Amino acid sequence: MVGAVGTAVVFSVILLGVGSSRTSFAIEQSNQAKALANACAEEALQQIRDSTPFTGNGDLAIGRGTCHYTVTTGGGQNRSITASGAVDTIIRKVEIIINRISPLIRVTSWEEKDDF
């Protein structure tokens, strides 16, 4: 009887450890995906800085993940940047709104989004 209870306790502890490991790994991937989305957003800002009329898209591959950005115009100096970062099946997205490019880029909003 004591052996059965001991075995059940050991088995439960092992399962909890495996579950905790998976959760920690998913959190790490989520943080990496967010960093990738922000890296692509920064790349898009650099493209705008290098060429004021820039609109378009691009991709980056960094480490175990990738990211994609799109820059669209809202007329005049207004721009919108959407960027997403992916690590395995985890995807994080950000949207940046710019209302001035010259003489300095002015970001009015930088928000994480569930979807675009």
Image: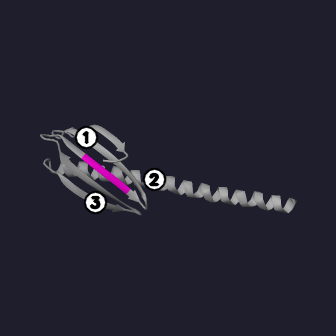
Q: Quadrant of residue 24?
A: bottom right
Residue ID for mark 1: 97
Residue ID for mark 2: 30
| Residue 83 inside the magenta-drawn segment | yes
Q: Earlier in the sequence, mark 3 or mark 2?
A: 2
Camera-side residue: 28 or 105? 28
Q: Quadrant of residue 96?
A: top left
Count the numbered circles shown: 3
| Residue 6 inside the magenta-drawn segment | no
Q: CA distance from mark 2 to mark 1?
A: 23 Å
The location of residue 92, given as percent across then percent down, is: 39, 51
Q: Main secondary structure of the magenta part?
A: strand
Residue range highlighted in magenta: 81-85
Could you say whether the residue bearing mark 3 is in a helix, strand or loop?
Answer: strand
The location of residue 50, given as percent across then percent down, is: 17, 51
Q: Earlier in the sequence, mark 2 or mark 1?
A: 2
User: Left of 12 or right of it: where is 73?
Assistant: left
Quadrant occupied by the N terminus: bottom right
User: Left of 112 or right of it: where is 79?
Assistant: left
**Residue at 30% in and 57% down:** 68
Identify the amino acid type marked 1.
Answer: Ile
User: Left of 58 or right of it: where is 53?
Assistant: left
Q: Residues within 10 Å of mark 3 (few under 14, many from 20)?
A: some
Tell me, for residue 59, which label it has, or none: 3
Indicate whether 73 appears above or below 6. Answer: above
The location of residue 79, given as percent across then percent down, is: 20, 43
**Residue at 33% in and 46% down:** 94
